[in-house]
C-alpha cells in the first residue's frame, strides 16, 4: 500500500473521498464536486439515511468517477485517533471496489485548520495499517477476493508537513507489520532457530543481534528457561537485540518478551480445542522485535535492549515433569507444578539476565501469559503490573495517545506468598483465583529493585475480528504504545 500526500485540490477523475458535516453540510470542495456533477451528491444524500454522522459513508457513482462521502459529525471531535478510525474505515470501504488509487480530500472544516497535517498523516498510516495482509500461504486466492486498492493519495493543505509526520509513523507501522508477520507464521515454520534468524534481519537497520543457544544458556545457569524447551527437538534460543541511538553512557531501556513458538502445555497437556491458537504464544516477543524494528527504523535517540526467550513447549520422553525442581539463573529454585505455566519460567531467566548484565533504567516485559487475564479484562484493555508508580503513569499516558488501552492490576504480599513451595524457593503456579496476578508476582521475584512493568497481552496479541486499523489475525498490539512511551519520555 502506497500512501502519498499532495496539494489539496479536487481531482479531475478517479475515486474521491469527500467530507460532509452533520446535517448533510458539505465542505467547500465537496460542494464544488456536487456542482460539477449537477447535484448528484446532494440527491444521493436525500435518497439515503446518510446525513454526515461521524464515520458514516455513502458511495455515489458520478460521471467524474466514484465518490465516497465521509461523515464528519459536528467536526469538533476530529483528532489523530478520529482520523485513524476514518483511514481504516475508508480503506475497508474501497479495498475491493475495483479502484487502484483513491484520493482522500482532507479539507479542514472552518476552525479546524490547526494540526491538520498531523491528522492527515494519521489517516494515511491508518490506511496502511488496515491494508496489512498475510497471504503467503494462499495459492488459490481469486483476483476478485484480493483488494484492488494499492495507493491512497491524501490531499491536504500542508502536504509537505504531513509527509514529514507520516515518515515517523510509517517506520512504526513497519514495526507493527514485522510483529504481525511473526505472530501469523505457523509453528512449523517459526520455531526458535528460524525465529532467531528472522531477528537477524534487523542488523540491516543497525541493530546488534546476538543469539545464544542451549550451550551458552546452560553455562549461564538458565535452568528455568531450558527446562521448558527440553521436551522439544527444536533448540531453545535467546536473542538479545541492541539499538544504541542514545548517549554513550545513558542506561538502556529494556524490553523482554515471551517467545513460546508453540505451547502444547507440555506434560500438563492442553485440550485439543483451540490449541492451534498457541502458535501466537510468542506474541510478547513479537512485539519486542517489532518495537526494535520501529525504533531503529526511525533512528530513535535512545539506547534500547530487546531480549526474547524462544522455546517450544512440547510433551516428550525428555519433557519436564510436574514435580521437577529447576534452578533459575538467579539461583532461586522453582518447583514446576504445572508445565503449562511455562511462560513465567522463560521470562524469569531472561529478566534476570538482562537486569544483571545491562543494569537497565527499566524493564518492561510482554507475554501472552495467562488465560486468567483474558477472563479479567477481555480483549479491550491490556492488564499490566508495575513496581514503580512513575513508570506506570508514563505507560498510561502513552496509551491515551495511541489508543492502545491499558489497565493497572495489583501486586502484593498476600498474592505473592501463594507461590511459596514446600520443597523449593517457589512453585510456578498459585491457586486458581487471581491467576494473572500470581503470575506477575512470580516474575516480580526476578526483577530486583529495577523499575519494572509486566504486560499480560494474552487478550491483545490476536484478534478474530477486523477493527479500524487492525485486520483480524496478529494485531501487533503494543508496538505503537511502547514506541510512544520511549518517544515521549526518553529521547
Ligand atoms: N500461553 C498460555 C496462556 C494463554 C492462554 C495465552 C490463552 C493466550 C490465550 C500460558 O502458557 C498458559 O498456559 N497459562 C495457564 C497457566 C495456568 C497453568 C496456571 C493458563 O492460563 O491456564
Ligand atoms: Mn502454557
Ligand atoms: Zn504459554
Image (cartoon, rainbow, N blue to C red):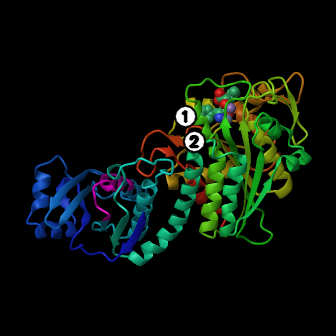
Check the image and report above or below for 70 versus 278: below
Query: Image quarter for residue 31?
Result: bottom left
Q: Earlier in the sequence, mark 2 or mark 1?
A: 1
Q: Which residues are magenta?
A: 88-101
Residue 408 appearing in the image: no
Residue 109 appearing in the image: yes
Looking at the image, in which quadrant does ligand 2 appear? top right
Residue position marked by numbered label 1 in the rendering: 377
| Magenta stretch contains residue 381 | no
Residue position marked by numbered label 2 in the rendering: 382
Query: Image quarter for residue 320?
Result: top right
Side of 52 where 237 appears, left or right: right
Side of 116 where 167 appears, left or right: right
Distance between the alpha carbons at the discs numbered 2 and 1: 7 Å
Q: In this figure, what is the number of numbered marks?
A: 2
Check the image and report above or below for 171 versus 416: below
Check the image and report above or below for 20 versus 473: below
- Residue shown at 25% from the left, 64% from the top: 15
Circle 2 Cα neighbour tier, 10 Å, few/some/many (<14 / 14–19 / ≥20): many
Percent from the top left, x then y, of residue 46? 11, 52
Percent from the top left, x then y, of residue 265? 69, 29
- Residue shown at 38% from the left, 76% from the top: 158
Q: Are marks 2 and 1 in contact (CB under 8 Å)?
A: yes
Looking at the picture, tell me which residue is in the foreground, 172 or 474: 474
Percent from the top left, x then y, of residue 150? 37, 63
SS at mark 1 in the image: helix
Circle 1 Cα neighbour tier, 10 Å, few/some/many (<14 / 14–19 / ≥20): some
Percent from the top left, x then y, of residue 167? 50, 70
Looking at the picture, tell me which residue is in the foreground, 487 or 175: 175
Check the image and report above or below for 29 versus 460: below
Amino acid at each position: 500500500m502506497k500512501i502519498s500526500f499532495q496539494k489539496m485540490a479536487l481531482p479531475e477523475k478517479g475515486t474521491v473521498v469527500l467530507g460532509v458535516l452533520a446535517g448533510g453540510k458539505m465542505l467547500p470542495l465537496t460542494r464544488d464536486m456536487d456542482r460539477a456533477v449537477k447535484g448528484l451528491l446532494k440527491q444521493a444524500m436525500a435518497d439515503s439515511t446518510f446525513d454526515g454522522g461521524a464515520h458514516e459513508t455513502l458511495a455515489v457513482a458520478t460521471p467524474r468517477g466514484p465518490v465516497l462521502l465521509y461523515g464528519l459529525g459536528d467536526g469538533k471531535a476530529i483528532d489523530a485517533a478520529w482520523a485513524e478510525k476514518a483511514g481504516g474505515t475508508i480503506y475497508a470501504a474501497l479495498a475491493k471496489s475495483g479502484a487502484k488509487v483513491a484520493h482522500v480530500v482532507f479539507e479542514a472544516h472552518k476552525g479546524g485548520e490547526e494540526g491538520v497535517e498531523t491528522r492527515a498523516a494519521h489517516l494515511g498510516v491508518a490506511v496502511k495499517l488496515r491494508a496489512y495482509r498475510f497471504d503467503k500461504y494462499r495459492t488459490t486466492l481469486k483476483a476478485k477476493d484480493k483488494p484492488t486498492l494499492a495507493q491512497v493519495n491524501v490531499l491536504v493543505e500542508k502536504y509537505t508537513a504531513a509527509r514529514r509526520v507520516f515518515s515517523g509513523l510509517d517506520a512504526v507501522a513497519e514495526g507493527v507489520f514485522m510483529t504481525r508477520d511473526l505472530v501469523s507464521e505457523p509453528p512449523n515454520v517459526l520455531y526458535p532457530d528460524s525465529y532467531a534468524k528472522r531477528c537477524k534481519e534487523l542488523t540491516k537497520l543497525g541493530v546488534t543481534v546476538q543469539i545464544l543457544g542451549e550451550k551458552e544458556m546452560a553455562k549461564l545457569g538458565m535452568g528455568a528457561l531450558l527446562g521448558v524447551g527440553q521436551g522439544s527437538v527444536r533448540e531453545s534460543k535467546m536473542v538479545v537485540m541492541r539499538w544504541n541511538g542514545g548517549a554513550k553512557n545513558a542506561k538502556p531501556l529494556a524490553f523482554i518478551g515471551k517467545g513460546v513458538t508453540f505451547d502444547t502445555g507440555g506434560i500438563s497437556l492442553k485440550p485439543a480445542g483451540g490449541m492451534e491458537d498457541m502458535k501466537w504464544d510468542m506474541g510478547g516477543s513479537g512485539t519486542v522485535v517489532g518495537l526494535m524494528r520501529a525504533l531503529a527504523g526511525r533512528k530513535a535517540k535512545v539506547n534500547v535492549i530487546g531480549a526474547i526467550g524462544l522455546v517450544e513447549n512440547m510433551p516428550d520422553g525428555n519433557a519436564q515433569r510436574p514435580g521437577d525442581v529447576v534452578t533459575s539463573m538467579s539461583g532461586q529454585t522453582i518447583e514446576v507444578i504445572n508445565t503449562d505455566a511455562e511462560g513465567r519460567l522463560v521470562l524469569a531467566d531472561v529478566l534476570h539476565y538482562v537486569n544483571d548484565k545491562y543494569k537497565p533504567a527499566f524493564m518492561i516485559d510482554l507475554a501472552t501469559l495467562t488465560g486468567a487475564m483474558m477472563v479479567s479484562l477481555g480483549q479491550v484493555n491490556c492488564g499490566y503490573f508495575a513496581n514503580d508508580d512513575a513508570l506506570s503513569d508514563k505507560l498510561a499516558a502513552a496509551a491515551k495517545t495511541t489508543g492502545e488501552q491499558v489497565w493497572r492490576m495489583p501486586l502484593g504480599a498476600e498474592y505473592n506468598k501463594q507461590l511459596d513451595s514446600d520443597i523449593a524457593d517457589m512453585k510456578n503456579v498459585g491457586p486458581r483465583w487471581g491467576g494473572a496476578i500470581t503470575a506477575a508476582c512470580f516474575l516480580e521475584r526476578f526483577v530486583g529493585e529495577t523499575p519494572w512493568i509486566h504486560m499480560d497481552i494474552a487478550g491483545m496479541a490476536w484478534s478474530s475480528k477486523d477493527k479500524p486499523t487492525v485486520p483480524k489475525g496478529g494485531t501487533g498490539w503494543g508496538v505503537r504504545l511502547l514506541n510512544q512511551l520511549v518517544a515521549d519520555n526518553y529521547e
